[in-house]
Structures are given as structure tokens and as C-alpha cells.
Image (cartoon, coloured by chain):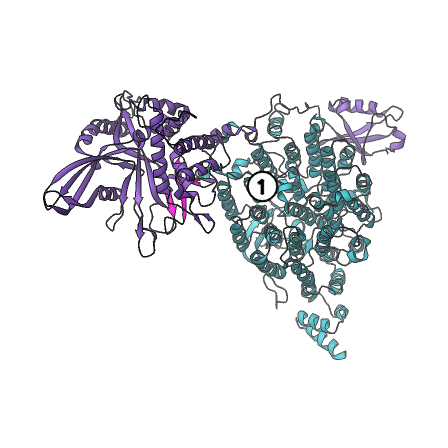
Chain colours: A cyan, B purple
Amino acid sequence: MVPVHQIVAFYMKHNAEPEAVDLLTEVEDIDTLLEHVDSSNYRRMCLYLTTVARYLPDIDAYFLNVAYKTYLEFEEYPSALRIALFLDGLENWEDIFMFCDDLLRRKQLCYILARHGVHIELKKGDVADDVDRLVLQDIINNAKLSEGYLTLARDVDVMDPKSPEDVYKAYLLYGRANAGASFDSARENLAATFVNAFVNAGFGQDMLMTVPSEASSGGSSGNWLFKHKEHAKISAAASLGMIRLWDVDSGLAQIEKYLHSNDNHVIAGALLGVGIVNCSIKHFCEPALGLLGDYIDKEDSTIRIGAIMGLGLAYAGTQNEHVRRTLIPILEDEKAPLDVIAFTAISLGLVFVGSCNVGIADIIVDALSDPSRSALGEPLIRLLLLGLCLLYLGKKDDVDSTGAAKVGFNQKIKKYYDITLLSCAYAGTGDVLKVQHLMGQCEQHLSRDAIHQGAAVLGLAMVAMAEDLGLEMELRSMEHLLQYGEQNIRKAVPLALGLLCISNPKVKVIDTLSRLSHDTDIEVIMSAIIALGLIGAGTNNARIAVMLRGLSSYYCREANLLFCVRIAQGLVHLGKGLLTLAPYHSEHLLLSRTAMAGIITLLHACLDMEATILGKYHYVLYFLVLAMQPRMLMTVDENLKPLLVPVRVGQAVDVVGKAGQPKTITGFQTQLTPVILAAGDRAELATKKYIPLSPILEGFVILKENPDYRDDH
Amino acid sequence: MPTVSVKWQKEMFPAVEIDTSQPPYVFKCQLYDLTGVPPERQKIMVKGGLLKDDADWSTLGVKEGQKLMMMGTADEIVKAPEKGPVFVEDLPEEEQVVNLGHTAGLFNLGNTCYMNSTIQCLHSVPELKSALIKYPQSGRSNDLDQSSHLLTVATRDLFNELDRNVKPVAPMQFWMVLRKKYPQFGQLHNGSFMQQDAEECWTQLLYTLSQSLRSSSSSENLDTVKALFGIELVSRVHCEESSEESSEAESVYALKCHISHEVNHLHEGLKHGLKSELEKASPSLGRSAIYLKDSRINGLPRFLTIQFVRFFWKRESNQKAKILRKVDYPLELDVYDLCSDDLRKKLDAPRQILRDEEGRKLGLKTNEKSAGSVDTDIKMLDAEGSSNGVGESSKAISQEGVLHDKGMHLTGLYNLVAVLTHKGRSADSGHYVAWVKQESGKWIQYDDDNPIPQREEDITKLSGGGDWHMAYICMYKARVIPM
């Protein structure tokens, strides 16, 4: 081993860190690296380690641990935290906090935790000072998210509310029959509600629901709300939550009055809206639990579903014990209707996502084993199963050790469950073996009955979306599935494409989906249209917008297809182009589990659109709210006030293993913050006056004045 | 007596004292003073739950300086409006049709697109519709056979159904009766019905209707179909060799547009089609000789049907082959120079008025802008204008018989209202589609059960010269003016 050490030492001294890592990988002695790092080479080494770990599924933890320790040693706490989050080692964050005693840096760490959707209760031991602790806790609780988002909106001047017509742009279409002015179409109104909710998400004002709320209370908004039929009112009332997204204080005040309505659908919608407003925000008074808890046991099942789904959205990823205690009795109630059970399972799955909570798993399995509920013809069983699987999201092998996998479902359910569980457990890992396994499930030509194949296709996307190389390969193999797959597979392929490229409109994928949107099979068409919305979500992509406008006239006679087109149009203009649905952040390294869970819940529901979003469960579309995040770079000063600095924004360049100090972006433009970042964009500061406290310029970044900076003028 | 701070919307009320000996309702009344929200509308969050009116403060464990959150507004509660909105989905189908602006499509019953497109084209003639409505259900006159009667009834019912439905209609009954009357449409090939020539279907159907509709309205003894579609032709038959000349008159339902190498435009084809050669025995020469037949139009219909003779019988392959040549056709057709001298004289006056009218319109734009008011002593009525909706068109049909003496005059000008196209290489294969102008002025492509809106400028692009849909039968509607 002596020569190896000599060679490694030489490599590390002479800018050849990748070779050193490769060599030590061969001899399986990666820890030795720690002896050779110094301040000149640790960055390149860690970058290479983290990248290469992606391709070494079994031993990646060793590599990342080395990187983690190195970062700690050189006080790169944000980077260390990224790796800790990637390793799913939440217990490590306390270590990082211990090491990092600078308040400003701690704030930056809290911003990263908040973006990842990690909810931590800071204790006295962690932060001694009460005031500081409150500030840090506020950051983790995302309390200022709405404020930052609105600052961005004001900066890019998109505060004016947009109406659905502004999105449809029907006047650009020829021959479009607009004779329907005299009557409202319930379907069109529901679509308009969703479009309105998506487009104005988080802006606090819109043209339908909130218009002259001060003029005569309940005037116009009440009218629009009551232009819906029965269950459509749920989504209409809940859209208020979307519009007021993240703004808990004034949002709840506005929604609360709908709880006094005498219409059960409106109440259910308002409850769901309460959940949506609180999504990814933690409020010190826990208003969601307080408000929704009372309605869980109501007689009417729509109200119950509204409250249950609201709880799921508000507390996703928190593993809140109160929520568990509130929801568990519903699953144990034998008389509860199936849809209530299904939404309870999903909500529990969301709240305890990736927790491997055996207790909950057992109870869901018990609920499932009731013979009257286990007929998979019922589309809601999918959600029940998915709720169970979400508990193991991203947990890889931990699944095998739990008993939940060994349940005596009937054959059809079992297959669906196995596939979904596998794909959830390995979601975002890029594990090639699992990809192959899932691919194997797709190659058989089975009847329409074999619904597990659809889940397998979605699973392929979930596993393979982790890194670029695997993603490209997956896009290619999807093409084969389209060619040779049966109907069950073909209808899932567009959805899988939508997941792979979510909020990242690649031209090739747009073309494929555009082709599929004229398929002969109506289910494929519907999936393709929704997928077009997903890949364009929040991008305002003109190409997709034109395409959808064309589809809206082409399918103007097909109510179902038109509805899908409208939803897709709303998604493309999500948050007027300021939001993203991408569950990955921090330069495509970290996967937010709650975001992923929200998306796949919708996608699994979309495997049977007729019964879900086209039927009376259209509000499953609101699960997307879990994935919504502003795609911005907001620089703040030491008092967390917005700070305008010039930054260069351009296409990210892969610099892993490159010699020297290569440029990290290309084709850049210099702009003043806050700026909007597209998929694959990277930003760097264009001034030496400040030092960013995070190496990754995304979301909120604290800037510190550079003490060495001298103004030339 | 702990003091707490209460957050209400964006406001903060610091230092609110709680009298723990009183029930929480008292506390709510305190907040009522501060916020104006009545106690029963207040929702107070005590960590993880709502504060109940009868709760016991001691069990809640409210601490000094704790932050509470109060929700609720003094706003009026949202109420459903008295009268709910009416949704399109709830309307009966007839009203949805009005809303939609066009009528339903027809299901393909197995190679019946030729029949569907024919029906869609004829269905666009409101006068025919109203004539059919008057057709009695049972009163079959003696000179009409049973199957013709049934076919007429089936046509009437089908037209009605098209008007009443939004969703596509399956023309089962019609299809059955048509096959019964004309067994050639029931031919089977490999166990399924064969594709047929749409022109044949068109002609046969019109023939049957002309038979049945004439006999029914015997009181007026007027042939409705003939009045609508019939074209009077006078022909001069001339023999080069013997310089014999005779003239004959006939009535046809369609003009033929012959397509030869010189023909690029409908007009040329029509001229071509009106000239023909025929061989017959010449009494003066005592043998058969070539006669030239030169026809001219002597009477114009309300609806001018033009058939493109695109198919000819190819002896070698034993099938009807298709001429793909591009033949342009206009949206507005003038047949003046195809008319006989007598008819031209009749047309001259109305045409002059029409020209004046148009000239004045143009002149108005340039010279009389300042005048402002439009001289409207002569109202020009488009043919479409007279037939807005079925109800009105029945009035139009009652005027039909007296059209010529009551002052509505034909001008020899025609507007395109329907095109029946064919796509494919032979008449008995391929696909037939109808493109019909609606009363709203919009064009709809009826591809069997699927009506698709189209642009007017795309309609003239169906002129052939490729493998795209190409016009096979065109139907023009006369422009009439009152005098």
C-alpha cells in the first residue's frame, strides 16, 4: 500500500484530485484522502467525490462521508449540510450547528433547511439566545417565504392579477366558437378556477375569487364561487388558498369566513384552502391543526376529505404527532367510506413521508385488508397503496427490513404495491439495477388489467430522474416503451416524461409529447397534455403555450380533453412564471421529499384520470402545491433585508474533474437581484463587494460585506 | 391574571389580560372590543387547538406573555345567490345546439362517409328542410312507391335529429331505408359494406325527394326540389356535315365541370361541360354523323350544384380512376356568360341594381364620408339574410313559389355554401367529407362524427392537385335582390 499512498499524495499536491479518488476507489481505501487534503485542493476533491458517488450505489455513503468531514474541517458548513441532507442524515445537522457558531452562517443554514422542507424545532441547547433562536426558527418555518416571493414579483413587475382569459388567449385562435357567452359551462368554470389558482398562486390577488372583497363582502367572489356545481365548489373555495399561498395571517382571515357557509362543499373547500395556505409554512399557533382538527369527525364525507387533505398538505414532512393521533382513528373506523380512507392514507403518507413509520404502515395495511376495500377496480385503492408507499420514500433498503412488505393482498394489488413500493423506496437514487428491474416489468405484453405496468413506468421516471446521464438514457428508453408497450404502458409514458423533465421544457420532450397529444388513444392524449403542462410548469414557455392554444381549438368539442388542456395552460403559467415544480434543488443535488410525494400522488391519480381529475376528485391537482417553490435567487443582507447586487446568470457548465479554474457558467447575462433562475441555470456574484454565505446561489442567500473590498472609484 | 399578546390578521394586540376566573367567553368579549369581531365568530388558537367557550383556563396552561392567534372577521358570511347559474351541461340538447353554432356530426356505419357527407351538404339547405317538415307522415300518394316514401320520411327525421343534437347521430334508419330503395348501396365486399360514389348517392337521393315532395304538395303542383336545384338548359344541336340544326330543352340537377388538360378553373370546366359531341343518325345524310351539342342555361335554381367530373371508368383496371388535376373554384361564382340570351336579358336589370348598390357602397367610403347617413332606399338582401333560422326559412319557402313575381330576383351570382370532397385515388375507396357554411357564416368540416371549425380561406384550397381532400361536388347559393 505504500506506493499507493505516495501516488495519492503526489496527485493531491499536483491538482489531480480525480485520479487520486479513482485510485483509492480501486483499493477501497477512500478515507486515506483525508490525510492529504488542504485548502487548495479540497473543493475540487469534494466536488468529484459527490459526483462520483452518484454512480456507486452501494458505497456512496463512504464517499460522501469523506466529503462531509472535509467540508466540516474547512468550515464550509452549507456544503456540509447539503451532503448531510443528501445522505438523509438529519441527526448530523446538530453537529453542523455545533461547529458553526456564527449567527449569520446559521441563518444561511436555516434557509437551506427551509428550502429542503425540513422542519426542526430549535431547542434552548442549540441556540442560547432567545431572540436569535426566534429569528432562526422563523427562517426554518418559512415565515418570510411569502414576503420574499412578493418582493420578487414586484421587482419583475408581475403583481397585476391575470385572468384565465389572459392565459387562454382565445382571440389568437380562428374559428373558435365563442357563442357560449350566454351560458356558463360548469366544466369550463372549474377549469378557469384551476387556471386562476395556478397563475395567481401566492400573489394574494386575482380577478375571480378575491376581486372587490372590500367593496361588498362576498360580492363578486361569492358569485364566482357559486358558478360551480356541487363538488366543483370544493376546488373553487380551495383556490383561495392557492392565491393566498404561504401568507398564513391574512390568508386564513379571508378563508375563515367560508367555514360559516351552509354549503358542505364550500366548507370542504375552505378547509382544503386552509391546508394549502399553510403548505410548507409552520406557524407558531398551529392554526391548521386547530381549525381542521374539529372537522375531521364530521358526518359529511366531503368535509372530512377537505379537512384530511388539508392536514396532509399543511403538515407534509413534519411527522407531527398530533396529526397522527387525529388521523389514525379514521383508518381504524370500519364504517368510513373508501374515499375518506384513501385520502387519510395519503395524508398520513405525506406527513410521515420517508419515515418508515411501522405503526402507521400496519394500520394502513389493516385498512386495506378489509375484503370489501381490496377490489382494485376502485381507483382510490391506488391512493391508499401510494399512501403506504410514501412512508418509505427514498429509504432504499430500509424497506426490506419492515414487515409492511409482507402483506397478504390479492395478486393484482400486490403487484401494484410491490412496484410502487420499490419505485418510492428508490425514488431519486438513480439506481441502475432498479431501473432494469422496473424495465423488466414493462416488457411483457399483458392485458389492460395489468395496471402495475403503469406504476412501473412512473417508477422508472422516479428512480432515473436523479442525475442527468440517467435521465437522458431514460428519455430514450421511454421511446421504446411507446413503440412496443401495451396501452397500460403507453398512457403512463407521457406522465413519466412529465416527471423526468418537470419544469424543464426540453425541446425533444416537447416534440414527443406534442406528437402524443394527437395519438389515437384518448388516455394517451390526456396524459400527454397534462405532461406538457408539467414540463412547462412555471416557465411561461412560449412554445408549449402556442401548442396548448392550438390543442384547445383542436379539442374544443371534447370536454374532457379541453379540461386537460386548460389545466396544462394554467400550469405553464404557474405563478406567472415565477414558480417551479422541480423537486430537486441546490443544483440538482437534493430531492425534497414532500415535493416529490406531492407530484407522484398526482401522477398516480392521473393513471386513472376519468375517475380522479375528470371525475369528482379534481382537487387532487392541489397536491402539486407541495412542490411549488419560487425559482428565484434572492440576496439578503445581514439583517435579512433584500439587497440588490449584480449577478451573472447563465447556463451551468459541468466542471467536475476539469483542470484549473474553469468558468462555471456560459452565455451569461448580468442582472440585478432578485433574479429568476431557469432549469439548468446557475448564478454567480458579479461583484467582489460581498461574499455569499452559501456556495450555491439559489433561493435565499445571505451576503456579507467583503472586508478586503476596495472601491476603485 | 396572565397577560398575553393576541395576533389578529396582521395586527398585534400586546398585553391583553386574561381573567382566569371567568370563562373564555369573557376573554372573547374583551377581544370583541379590540377587533369588532363578534365572540361567536371568533376562533382563538391555543397551540394546537381551538379555545372553547366553556373551557377551563387552568387546563389550557396559558402562560404569561404567550402569543395567541385569533381568527375571524366581522364580514358578512358568504351566501349562495338565490338563483343558481344555468350551466350548458344542464341544458336540453336543442338549446346546446343554438349555443354551439353548428349541428351534429354523423357516425360512420362502415364505409358510409359518402352518405354522411351527402346528407350534411343537403342538410344545409333550409328550404329543403322546411319542405320536408311539411311532408306528411302517412299520407302517401298513390303514384309513389313505399320505399321512396320511407326514404323521404327517414330523411326528414334525420334532418330533425341533426338539428336537435349536439352529440353525433347514428343514421341507422336512413341507412337501412336507403339500402332498401337502392340495393346497390348494400353491396358487400369481404363481409363489409363497400365504399360508394357520393355523387350517385346525391343524385339518387335528390331524385327520390323530387318524386315524393312533388306528389305531396299536389295542391300547388310544384316541384320543390326542381325549384331549388333544377337547372334549365337549352341546347343547340348542330351537325357540321349536314348543317342541320335543332334545339332541345332539358332540366338537370347539376352542372358538370369537365376536367381536361386545358381546364384550370371551374369556369373553364363548366364551359367545357356544356359543349358535347354526340353521334346520331342524321336524317338528311342517311347515316350516323357527329353532332355538336352546345348548351346554355335558360333557368337558374336557388341552389346551383356543380359536380367535378373527377372519375372516369378505366377499362384496364376495371375501376373508377380519379383525375387529380387542380381546378380552382371561387367563393363567389358568376354564371352570366353561361346563360342563354333570354335569361341574360332577365338578369341584366337585377345585376345593374346590384352593381349600382355595390358601387354606391364603395363610393360612400370615398366621397360621402361626411354625409354620414346611408341611403337605404334599396335594401340588398343576401340570400343568407332571408333564411336566418329554420323558423324564418319556412316563411321563405312559402314565398318560394312566388319568388320570381314577388320581386326577389336572381342575379346570376352565387355564393359557395357547401363542398363535398373526396380524398383517395378512386371513387369507391378513400374518404368523403362535407364542408358546410353555417348560418353564422362559419365553415364546419363534417368528418363523419367530428365537426371541425375551418377558415373560409382554407375552403378554396380544396381544389385538388395532390392527395389532400379535393372538391367533388360544390353547392352554390343564389344571391337575390328585391326589386
Position of residue A405 measured from the top left corner of the image (x, y, whole percent): 78, 54
- Badge 1, how many Cα within 10 Å: few under 14, some, many 20+? many
In which quarter of the view is residue A195 placed? top right
**Helix, strand or loop under label 1:** helix
User: Which of the pair A236/A422 is nearer the observer?
Assistant: A422
Q: Is residue B443 magenta?
A: yes
Tell me the residue at 20%/31% (across/down): B343
Q: Quadrant of the N terminus of chain B?
A: top right
Residue occupied by mark 1: A567
Q: Tell me the chain of label 1.
A: A
Position of residue B154 measured from the top left corner of the image (x, y, whole percent): 44, 32
Above/below status of A240 relative to B196: above
The residue under label 1 is which amino acid type?
Ile
The residue sitting at the front extreme is: B142
Tell me the residue at 30%/44% (across/down): B308
User: Which of the pair B421/A341 is nearer the observer?
Assistant: B421
Q: Which residues are magenta?
A: B421-447
